[in-house]
Image (cartoon, rainbow, N blue to C red):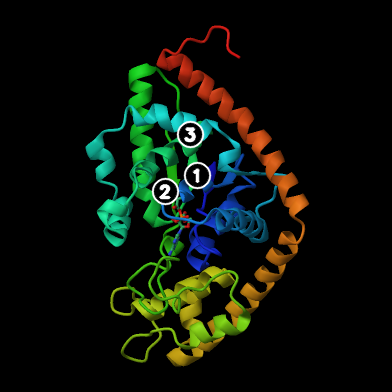
Amino acid sequence: MLSGAQPTADSYHLGNYFGAFKQWVALQDEFEAFYFVPDLHAVTVEYDPALLRERTYVAAAQFLAAGVDPDRSALFVQSHVPEHAQLAWVLGGITGFGEASRMTQFKDKSVKGGQDLSSVGLFTYPILMAADILLYQADKVPVGEDQRQHVELTRNLAQRFNHRFGETFTVPEPHIVKATAKIYDLQDPTSKMSGSNQSHAGVVDLTDTPKQVAKKLRSAVTDSGTEIAFDPVAKPGISNLLSIYSALTGDPVETVVAEFEGRQYGHLKVALGDLLAEFVGAFGDRTRELLDDRGELDRILAQGATQAREVAATTLDLVYERSGFVRGIRP
Ligand code: TYM
């Protein structure tokens, strides 16, 4: 199993946590897992090098704070494993231009940033993501709903390569947990929670202070009516809060709804605000502690990269062999 989350913001948010990290942690008992910080993906948009370096450390610390266990899972930084870029190049040769043009995330991002400002790297990004996954022969890729199309492309590329050059890649399945596949913005509960949303008032970051979190919850947009019910179409705001409450406590949504029966929206907002403030407070403490020891983080990432390279090099070797590259005496 393999997954990653881009280090393109100062912190991950609740959407990343529930959509991805929680699944990563649960699955590491069952699978041989590889979790990585995709720093090569982060250079496809304009960025600041010093900030990227810092965000990469914060990303690794937040993976660990979420419960990724480096003794069970390989935790590494993408640029430490050159095979990602090498395989991406080969896969680029079997990806159709039209096929890549259909990726909705590229379309969204290039509309936001302007077509001329969008880089070629942003366009070919899903091919690199396919390489990330296929290098590890992953069976499952735990992601949120917004990454489904990229995993679908990965499946197509794996099947195409296998068909043309012989069985080489495992065809991966996305692992998407429906209840938390899309956490919505607290101010605009019809858009997903995202670090690139214009206002940050509806995005709960994992580095927020308990006070900030409580405030964001108090001002969360709710719906007309007064009854607390789970109905994502008619009551997107309340349903989003119920989903988060359920994910955080582990109680099914129906139980949460029953718990709040006869009470008002405000009660749910305050109760969830308290729970989240406590959660984020503890998460922040753990992250800061990990960030205080960069030597230890470097050690964990080096160990992860060594484990990752062993698998990645074996796959790339097979791909080069199948691709017809000369495998004689190599430096
Ligand atoms: P990224 O960095 O945008 O997001 C990381 C993970 O968080 C999930 N996610 C959400 N889930 C629920 N609700 C939300 N509001 C929400 N926002 C984000 C994403 O679906 C994702 O699982 N291309 C990837 C990073 C990547 C990757 C990979 C992932 C690069 N290579 C290989 C898996 C395998 C991305 O941009 O995710």
Residue 137 visible, this orientation: no
The residue wearing badge 3 is: 85
Q: Amino acid at mark 3?
A: Ala
Classify mark 2: helix, strand or loop.
loop
**CA neighbours of label 3 inside 10 A, class few (<14), some (14 to 19), many (20+):** some
- Where's the N terminus, which quadrant? top right
Callout 3–callout 1 Cβ contact below 8 Å: yes
Q: CA distance from mark 3 to mark 2?
A: 13 Å
Q: Which residue is mark 1?
A: 40
Q: Residue at x 65, y 78 (%)?
A: 278
> Is label 2's Cβ within 8 Å of ligand 1?
no
Q: Residue at x 55, y 53 (%)?
A: 49
What distance separates the C-alpha of mark 3 from that of mark 1? 8 Å
Q: Horizontally, is 136 left or right of 99 in the view?
A: right
Number of residues whose C-alpha sits closer than 10 Å to that of mark 2, classed few (under 14), some (14–19) or many (20 or more): some
**Does residue 276 lie above or below 294 as drawn?**
below
Closer to the camera in the image, 117 or 124: 117
Classify mark 3: helix, strand or loop. helix
User: In percent of the image, x 55 and y 33: which residue is there?
Assistant: 82
- Judged from the image, the secondary structure of the residue bearing numbered disc 1 is helix
Q: Is residue 202 visible?
A: yes
Q: Which mark is residue 44?
A: 2
The tag earlier along the polypeptide, 3 or 1, is 1
Q: Is residue 313 above or below residue 286?
A: above
